Amino acid sequence: MESNQANPSILCSPEGSQRTLYPYVTGTSVVALKYKDGILMAADMGGSYGSTLRYKSVERMKPIGKHSLLGASGEISDFQELLKYLDELVLYDNMWDDGNSLGPKEIHNYLTRVMYNRRNKFNPLWNSLVLGGVKNGEKYLGMVSMIGVNFEDNHVATGFGNHLARPILRDEWREDLSFEEGVKLLEKCMRVLLYRDRSAVNKLQIAKITGEGITISQPYSLKTFWGFSAFQNPTAGAEGSW
Amino acid sequence: MTKQHANWSPYDNNGGSVVAIAGADYCVIAADTRMSTGYSILTRGYSKISKLADKAFMASSGFQADVKALQKHLTAKHLIYQHQHNKQMSCPAMAQLLSNTLYYKRFFPYYAFNVLGGLDTEGKGCVFTYDAVGSYERVGYSAQGSGSTLIMPFLDNQLKSPSPLLLPAVDAVTPLSEGEAIDLVKTVFASATERDIYTGDRLEIYVLNAHGTHHEYMELRKD
Amino acid sequence: MFRNQYDTDVTTWSPAGRLFQVEYAMEAVKQGSAAIGLRSKTHVVLACVNKANSELSSHQKKIFKVDDHIGVAIAGLTADGRVLSRYMRSECINYNYTYESPLPVGRLVVQLADKAQVCTQRSWKRPYGVGLLVGGLDESGAHLYYNCPSGNYFEYQAFAIGSRSQAAKTYLERRFQSFTDSTREDLIKDALIATRETLQGEKLRSSICTVAVMGVGEAFHILDQDNVQKLIDAFEIVGQDEAPAAEPDAAVPAEQGAPAEGGAGAGADAGAAPEVDVAPMDI
């Protein structure tokens, strides 16, 4: 077994180190839920450089093999690096060509080990990951955090989504949600996030995974309504502010 | 660019309370199923109890990723033990293994607070309670985790276990019947849920006795 | 006197394109007591003959659990078999740790074969002197593989290795077409009969054989001796009385017909025909 002794000095001396101590370009929330036939997942396409909206067409949901779909928030470069590892993993899995394949449960567990091992080396991948999938008629939806915290649930959301989207999901989610209802529910969540999360952008994708396969939608926008009086005159009722 | 973010930490506290009570011929192991981070709930249905052997169950709170790693490590060790010895590990043996495993990471600890409950080789209930770095003790009952400060004094009061300072030593197992112990566990969790925000949602209970293992749930407050 | 110039180390080729040391290792497999495996769509049964080396000793374990879904039966050097089983166990545990799912049988078998292959290409190593029948289940169904010291591996419906395994193979060859749809009980029965075939007239008793089963919803386990004896009695598998005229001893070196013929044309030149009843290498 490798040594797990921490070296506290690496925590305080970032000079010359090759570790992610803070993220550069980040994506915001991912929201996902189980529905009647599989999993639906939504994420917007913004890539923020601090508070600057630096990229506007970042794909944050990707298929992993035939049975899994991965969504990520957090450091975009770490996510794209992770995709390279996963593509290699899935390629080697396919090369066996023996009728066995890694399902969403296996990929989720693998990701958990990767994230946890990196945190043990004080060199985390700066992401929150959402993994959804269907294999042999079995739906799977789980999450992994930057430091390896992981769980499964009927609906999950990263970042702001955990604060703003999950209360809605807890209220309205059902096991037998149809595709249309599922998309409508996700759009409701994404609209709230768009209004309230400053780094969210109005350009998003919705991905679907079922026993039939994976489809990721073209980017599109949500209809918004900014005509509320509080939006028209935000300083009313806040005397003395700007 | 100056750092404007909080320093990264390899640890988190995902909360939760765990309790175990040993009787003369049974053991009750219980934990809530809430998992939190900060003021947010991550999920309401995460089991903190892991079956390590037929007669050894571990309930753990603390940092979920560490807890999971610890559970997987012990499960793997137990598999090897079974291959080598052709039997299940006893609860006291598992207790020592858990202690060694925790101490092995003394200088980068598993942030895990465990109680191990089960039956010993005589079929008597046993509970072992730990700190994060492996010091442990066999007791008659114990509570760990975010609600332990609320639960432990209540158990002390209700169970009136003989003092460990008594000489000659008096057996620590509780005088309660199995049914009474289960009721007590339900009460302490319902109470802890009232004041501890990290405890709630659902209570998972395992009962071990000569007949085998029994598993049940009780709903808790979800706020 | 004849002396082979090309067999002093593993890595030396003979002009005929053979590696004698590897072939000798495969001879060791033939000298071990027999091991048998067969599978249906849903179950795999492994069986073996247990021979004590002396009146004073007990026999050695020849069937090992690797994981809930994989088991092996070995013939040849038991010590090598144990080392390889331990390797397989640890591979299963590691895979399970990473993916929380069972390691596919075929993949473990390839890893095992690659490990054996290395020993045929390093001057300071020795090939493993053991043949392994690896049985298991995964999402592609039930599997039975034979791994041999040369690093070759083959998948089978049913197979037998070890001393006098030809008799068992003859029996299995006659019957294998029905195995796919066999019930668990029929599979065990066929395993016991095939085991008896290798005994050459000696009475089949639970004390000289081991049977293990794994299947869909049934984790690998070795049947206990009482149950095996009950099955033997129930199936009325007794001595030679109704033995289906299998050709005697002479069958042993005539193994070539089967596709198991490893490495190069497995040599029948390894001195005299192997001792039939004792297993001198099986210590």
Image (cartoon, coloured by chain):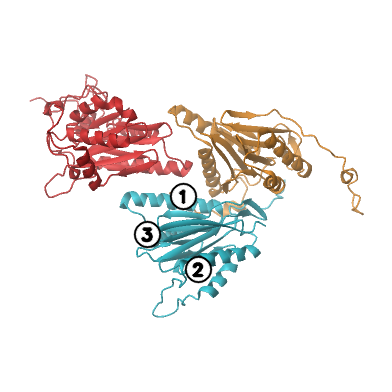
The residue at the point 48 percent across, 28 percent down is: A94
Residue C127 picture quarter: top left
Quadrant where the N terminus of chain C sits is top left
Output the letter for the chain in orange. A
Q: Is residue C89 above or below residue A222?
A: below
| Percent coordinates x, y for residue A81 in the rendering | 59, 35
- Position of B191 with respect to C154 (left or right) is right
Q: CA distance from mark 1 to mark 3?
A: 18 Å
The residue indicated by pointer 3 is B90
Which hue is chain B drawn in? cyan
For disc 1, the neighbor class at 10 Å (few under 14, some 14 to 19, many from 20) is some
Question: Marks 1 and 2: CB-CB under 8 Å?
Answer: no
Name the chain letter of the residue that bears numbered label 2: B
* The residue positioned farthest toward the bottom in the image shown: B167
Quadrant where the C terminus of chain C sits is top left
The answer to whether one can see residue A195 in this image is yes
Comparing C5 with A30, the one in front is A30
| Percent coordinates x, y for residue A51 in the rendering | 76, 42
Q: CA distance from mark 2 to mark 3?
A: 26 Å
Q: Which mark is residue B72?
A: 1
Q: Is residue A220 above or below residue C72?
A: above
